[in-house]
Amino acid sequence: MTLEEYILQHSEPEPDYLYRLWRATNIRTIHGRMASGHLQGRLLKMLVEMIRPQTILEVGTFSGYSAISMAEGLSDGGRLYTFEINDEMEDFTRPWIEGSAVADKITFLIGDALVEAPKLGITFDMAFIDGDKRTYRETFEMVMGILRPGGFILADNTLWDGHVVDHAYDHDHQTQGISDFNDYIAADPRVEQVILPLRDGLTLIRKSRESE
């Protein structure tokens, strides 16, 4: 038994619907590994249950795995707004979201969250950033502008397969985007942050209650 198998056996089981979504994502899409998967999905659900947000913004829906996982943790009346910029994913993703047990808690939108999310006129309690790695810093600033003081941001893929500490990837635009974001967050007095070495790196960020 591997350590990963041991961890999964001793964590909350993955719901069958999400397992089937994960399988379909890996079979029918090119970048199936981008789906959150069992361990991260259960963590996202638990973090939502702990933070107890009423409104969540997700930047980067992909196949809908993380959106469904977070929506599972929402209390009655809570809502998650998720943006996917790649309209080619819609035919795959929308049926999975609409067929889930939490479909009534999810608003799935095709478009650029950097432009469209502020137009919603919503102050969010929590956000999950998992879109274009080259624009993480810009996405973070957009989110900070519509996140309540004391709110939480989760940023995915912040270790980027370890490339952030491998100089061979210094000229890779996605690695540069993640590295710049990590440095920016570490120096930002408006937030507290911690990187969890889970999967490909997950950064938990809390906006100061004094932030404007």
Image (tube, rainbow, N blue to C red):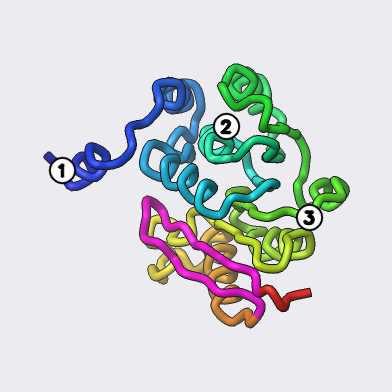
Query: Which residues make up the magenta segment?
Result: 190-208
In terms of sequence position, does the residue under pointer 3 or pointer 1 come before the other?
1
Looking at marks 3 and 2 on the same chain, the residue that comes earlier in the sequence is marked by 2
Direction from residue 184 to residue 21 in the image, left or right: left
User: What residue is shown at x 61% (from left), y 60% (from top)?
Assistant: 152
Tell me, yes or no, whether the highlighted magenta stretch contains residue 206.
Answer: yes
**What amino acid is labelled 2 in the image?**
Gly
Residue 113's place in the image compared with 35, above or below, is below
Q: Which mark is residue 2?
A: 1
Q: Residue 163: image x %, image y %?
A: 41, 62
Distance between the alpha carbons at the discs numbered 3 and 1? 43 Å
In the rendered image, which residue does mark 2 sit on? Answer: 64
Mark 1, other Cα within 10 Å: few <14 / some 14–19 / many ≥20: few
Question: Residue 147 at what x, y percent from top left?
Answer: 73, 60
Most common secondary structure along the magenta stretch: strand
**Residue 40 falls in image quadrant:** top left
Kindly report which numbered mark, 3 or 2, lies closer to the viewer in this rendering. 3
Q: Nearer the viewer, residue 135 or 186?
A: 186
Q: Which residue is mark 3?
A: 123
Q: Are marks 3 and 2 in contact (CB under 8 Å)?
A: no
Looking at the rendered structure, the secondary structure element under dot 1 is: loop
Mark 3 vs mark 1, foreground winner is: 3
Residue at 58% across, 60% down:
173
